Amino acid sequence: MGSSLSCFGSQKVEEVEVLSSTGGNNSWRIFTYKELHAATSGFSEDNKLGEGGFGSVYWGKTSDGLQIAVKKLKSMNSKAEMEFAVEVEVLGRVRHNNLLGLRGYCAGSEQRLIVYDYMPNLSLLSHLHGQYAGEVQLDWKRRMKIALGSAEGLSYLHHEVNPHIIHRDIKASNVLLDSNFGPLVADFGFAKLIPEGVSHMTTRVKGTLGYLAPEYAMWGKVSESCDVYSFGILLLELITGRKPIEKLPGGIKRTITEWAEPLIAKNMFKDLVDPKIRGNFDENQLKRAMNVAALCVQSEPEKRPKMKEVVSLLKGNYGDPKAPIMMQMRLKSVKYGDDLLDLDQNSDDDDNDNDNDEKDVDESSGDDVFGAFDMKKMQDPYKRR
Ligand SMILES: Nc1ncnc2c1ncn2[C@@H]1O[C@H](COP(=O)(O)OP(=O)(O)OP(=O)(O)O)[C@@H](O)[C@H]1O
Ligand SMILES: [Mg+2]
């Protein structure tokens, strides 16, 4: 079925050379449905890499040998074909070493497909908590490279692209890893591809609650600083190897900030590091990274640093010597309300895998500064009135 459907007609196959911000060339083009159908063995289950909020992703190989990942978007009848094409073309022009650029797309009356380069080391999620978790390929050096590269990709989206792009969905499955474990942030600008009236906030919460900035989850208030918050959670995840929300033996769910807060308060920095690294880490880098994470996850958006500041802080560059040094060696935890936690599914499948190295630490904050943040009922920021 559908194999005869071509995208913009098989005649109109454009090939555009897009100059990368880092100098390389990337060809970008419109694919035919037939071509993508053949490349992915008819979108077979065997080729499926996974499924996200917007549809399924399939591994494929084009006739000229290029390995690709094809995202087949769920049917979206209200997004006009031309409108979709224009937006994908805009996104297709965004090029940076740390952003997973689009290889092309296919849009027909029924289908919307986006084509990316296939990333052989899959996602950060697969290495931290998924199929590669047992192999421990992510040593400290690689983790720091992933943190800095992801920050640079985001900084490019926030500060260099015109108009600026807010990612809105920074998380471990959206950081893909190339053959050298270099990070590429994926799925930026995706919110623009969602048709009006489609609520995907519930889907987001199902997979992503632990990364959502409080003001976004509560009031749907979107700004660059929501991405900064999510990046802070991602950084904590990279350092600690823990999930943004984990389920404790009694069924209680705990956020990564709730776990980290007492350890930081007691200066137990070394206990924060993922035990899988077996103590092989750089202490200065650890303190620097924890400082950045603590700055990023502040509940007040205006207090969080900009992504370009995050990049220079991670590099150990504190900028203008006269400027106040941004130090935040305390971390305020965020606690989500039960209604939101009930929607979270990611932590539901790990009942047993996080209680092996529980530390005997006082979980109560005992300090007003660390008062838990209770989330109210969230609203869908995409809802049009
Ligand atoms: N280019 C790629 N190379 C390798 N794996 C990929 C590629 N693109 C996506 N994946 C993987 O395919 C799976 C599904 O991706 P998808 O983006 O649909 O879902 P997600 O990232 O879990 O959630 P979201 O829809 O919020 O982005 C994820 O595990 C993702 O890491
Ligand atoms: Mg994704």
Image: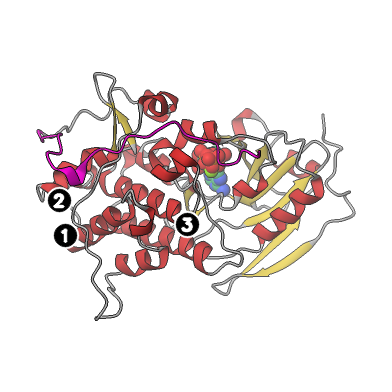
Tell me which corner region of the image, top left, top right, bottom left or bottom right, holds residue 57. Answer: top right
How far, Cα to Cα, is label 2 from label 3? Answer: 29 Å
Amino acid residing under circle 2: Phe
Examine the rendered structure and indicate whether residue 193 appears above or below residue 336: below
Amino acid residing under circle 3: Glu
* Quadrant, the N terminus: top right
Name the spot of residue 219 as percent of width and height, x first: 47, 41
Q: Mark 1 points at which residue?
A: 283
Q: What predominant SS class does the magenta segment belong to?
A: loop
How far, Cα to Cα, is label 2 from label 1? Answer: 9 Å
Name the spot of residue 137 as percent of width and height, x first: 33, 48
* Quadrant, the C terminus: top right
Q: Can residue 97 be seen in this view?
A: no
Q: Earlier in the sequence, mark 3 or mark 1?
A: 3
Examine the rendered structure and indicate whether residue 358 appears above or below residue 148: above
Q: Which of marks 2 and 3 is nearer the N terminus?
A: 3
Secondary structure state at the residue bearing disc 1 = helix
Q: Does the magenta stretch include residue 118?
A: no
Tell me which corner region of the image, top left, top right, bottom left or bottom right, holds residue 338. Answer: top left
Mark 2 and ligand 1: say if the CB distance to the nearest ligand atom is below 8 Å: no
Secondary structure state at the residue bearing disc 3 = helix
Name the spot of residue 311 as percent of width and height, x first: 37, 66
Secondary structure state at the residue bearing disc 2 = helix
Q: Name the residue under label 2.
A: 269
Q: Does the magenta stretch include residue 365?
A: yes
Q: Name the residue under label 3.
A: 224
- Looking at the image, which is closer to me, 352 or 39? 352
Does 65 sit left or right of 158 as displayed?
right
Mark 2 near mark 3, Cβ–Cβ under 8 Å?
Answer: no
Range of the magenta residues?
Answer: 360-385
Nearest to the eye among marks 2 and 1: give it. Answer: 2
